[in-house]
Structures are given as C-alpha cells and as structure tokens.
Image: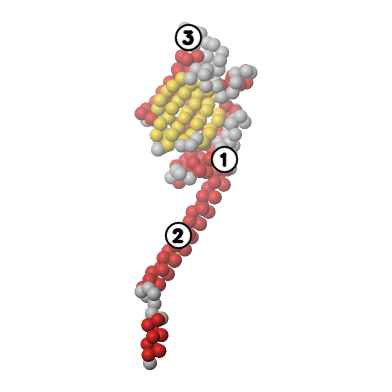
Amino acid sequence: MRKKKEFEENNEPSAPLWTLTYSDMVTLLLTFFVLLLSFSNMDKAKFEQAAHSLKGALGILQQYPSPRNKIGLYLENQEMQQREEIIDNVTELQRKAKELQMAEDINIQVTDNGLLIQLGDKVLFDVGNAELKPSAYPLLDIVGKTIRKHARTILVSGHTDNIPIKTPIYPSNWELSSARAISVVKYLIDYDGVPPELLAATAFSEYQPIVPNTTPENQRKNRRVEFLVTWK
C-alpha cells in the first residue's frame, strides 16, 4: 500500500493540466498564422509577376534600365486600389506615347518613395520656347491623373542642354528652364485639377544633365521636364 502511494506521489504532473490545453491552442494559432503568411506571400509573388510585365512602361528609354527589382517592393506598400491605378495609368501613358510616336522621349522610374517621370522637350515644347504644344496635352493629362490623388509632393523641374540662348524673353537657359517648369505646373493646376499646394516649380538650366552634352542626340535627351513625385 505504501509503495502504491509513493508511486502516485512521484508521478504527479509537473504542471497544471490546463496548461496542456493552452499549449495545444497556441500551437493551432501558430499554425493558422503561418498559413495566412503563406497565402500573403503567394499574393505578393503574383503581384510582382504582374508588375514585372510592365518593364516596358517603367523603363522606356534604353539609357535608363527598368527598375524591375524595385517596382514590386514599392507597390506592395501601397493600397491595392492605388497599385491598380498606378499600373493602369503608367500603361496608358506608354500607349499614348507610342500612339504619338514619342515613346523615346518618355521615361518613368520608381524611386525609393515615389516616381520620377521624365518628358523630353520634344514632347512638350518647340525649340527655344516655353509654351506647351497642344500635342502634349494628352500626355500631361495622364500624368496629372496619375499623381493628383495620392501625391504628397510634386516637384516639377526644367532642364536644358548646354547650348546658350539669348532672346528678349529668355536671356539665358535659366529663364527658359524656369518658364517651362512653370508652364507645366500651371497646366496641371488649371486643366488636371492637381492641388496647387502639392506642386513646386524649379529650374536647373544646363547643370543637371543625364548624359554628357557631347552629341546632338545627348543634348536632346538633356532637354526635359521632370516630375519627382512622393506618395502619401
């Protein structure tokens, strides 16, 4: 009898019985969340595959490599509706540029927190002029639609090549690049409904080239207006 009593005392559970049920519940919850995470990764992979298909729209000029490694990371941080809008608008911009035979003068890059859109001056202006060409309106409308709803800031900058200009209206490339940036800003406000408090216009003249001004082709690439967009 004594041996039986000693056996029962020595084999008492080391922890309360309710902890066994609790540990089972925690294990099931962990399994559940691992399953949810796997579903999330699957959706992300599908989305990155879709974003990868836009490589033509996100790197139109050959001298700018398509940022395929960044597009998935950037867009996954946006709301799903915003992702779809950005992709649709970028695709529409590419289609319109091809339709107008201006695809070589448009480039879109993904930055760490937004977009950089570059439009060549051939798209927007005549040589030595800051008045927008009517053919530029459809492209600017698409840009305005892309940025007006979700942007935190939009910096519009004018750039020229290194060929000097001296006219009564534009004494130097500073005045020309400034006037071009302002023309674009005013259009976005007046015709595309972009909130003016989001916009800023600046001029870089010839001092921020993207390629050396060594050939007429390179000079053409340097004559551009850029939209640096940061998202909310």
Name the kind of residue labelled 2 in the image.
Answer: Phe
> Vertical placement of 122 versus 30: above or below?
above
- The label shown at residue 80 is none
Q: Residue at x 45, y 59 (%)?
A: 33
Circle 1 is placed at which residue position? 68
Distance CA(mark 2)–CA(mark 3):
66 Å
Circle 3 is placed at which residue position? 171
Q: Residue at x 47, y 30 (%)?
A: 228
Circle 2 is placed at which residue position? 33
Pinpoint residue 82: horizontal percent, then vertical percent: 44, 42
The crowding category of the residue bearing disc 3, from other C-alpha atoms within 10 Å (few below 14, some 14 to 19, many at least 20), is: few
* Quadrant of image for the C terminus: top left
Pinpoint residue 51: horizontal percent, then vertical percent: 54, 43
Q: What element does badge 3 sit on? A: loop
Name the kind of residue labelled 1 in the image.
Answer: Arg
Q: What element does badge 1 sit on? A: helix
